[in-house]
Amino acid sequence: MNRLKNNGVFFSLLLTSTISIFLACSTVSDKNTNINRPDENLKAQKINHQTLKYAQFRKKGNQEIIILPIEIPKMKDYAVGLSNREQVENFGMLFNFKQETKYQGFSMKKTKFNLSIAFIDANKRIVDIQEMQAFHNEIYISKYPFQYAIEAPEQWFFINNINIGDAVALP
C-alpha cells in the first residue's frame, strides 16, 4: 500500500514537472498562427546590455509570425550598436528613439560585417528596409519618419520575407 502511495506521489510530481516544463518552453500561439522559432542552438555574441528579448514580425494579410531575438542597448550605447562585435548570429538590436524622427542615421564605419536594418514607425509598421555594408562611410537614413530601428544579420528581412508594411510587436 505504501509503495502505491509513493508511486502516486512520484507520478504526480512527474506530471507537474512535465506540464511546468511544457508551459515554460511553449510560445503563445493560436490555431491560425504559425511560428518560426529561432534555432536555439545558435549562440549569440557576449551580451553586456541585458538579456535578449524578442521582436515579433506579423506578415501583412497573414497570421504568420516571425520571431527575432533582439538585444536592447542603453541609449548611451546607441552610437556603438553592433560595431564592437566580430559577427551577429541569429539576433538583432533594437533602437527606440522615443518619438518619430527622419534624420537619425546609422553608420557602418566601424562595423565588421554587413547588416540589414528595418525602420519602424510609431504605429509599429515597417516603413523602410535597407542593406548596410561593413566598413562603409555612408550614413544610412530612412526614407520615411521612424521611431524604432532593428538591425539584423545581413539579408535577414529578405530571407524571412519581411516587407514594408508588416507589423512588429516589440518588448
Image (tube, rainbow, N blue to C red):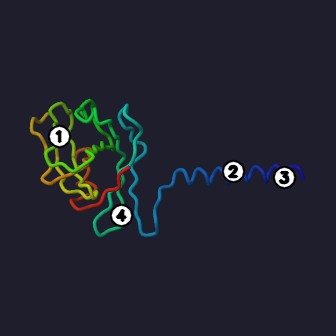
Marker disc for residue 5:
3
Q: Amino acid at mark 2?
A: Leu
Q: Is label 3 in contact with label 4 (beta carbons under 8 Å)?
A: no
| Residue 93 picture location, percent across and down | 30, 42
Does residue 164 appear to the left or right of 138 in the view shown? Answer: right
Indicate whether 48 appears above or below 35: above
Q: Amino acid at mark 3?
A: Lys
User: Looking at the image, is mark 4 or mark 2 earlier in the sequence?
Assistant: 2
Residue bearing mark 1: 106
Dot 3: element:
helix
Q: Is label 4 in contact with label 2 (beta carbons under 8 Å)?
A: no
User: Looking at the image, is mark 3 or mark 2 earlier in the sequence?
Assistant: 3
- Residue found farthest to the right: 1
Q: Is label 1 in contact with label 3 (beta carbons under 8 Å)?
A: no
Dot 4: element:
loop
Marker disc for residue 14:
2
Does residue 149 appear to the left or right of 56 in the view shown? Answer: left
Residue bearing mark 4: 64
User: Looking at the image, is mark 1 or mark 3 earlier in the sequence?
Assistant: 3
Marker disc for residue 136:
none
Q: Is label 2 in contact with label 1 (beta carbons under 8 Å)?
A: no
Name the residue at 39% across, 38% down: 43
Mark 2 neighbour density, 10 Å: few (under 14) some (14–19) many (20 or more): few
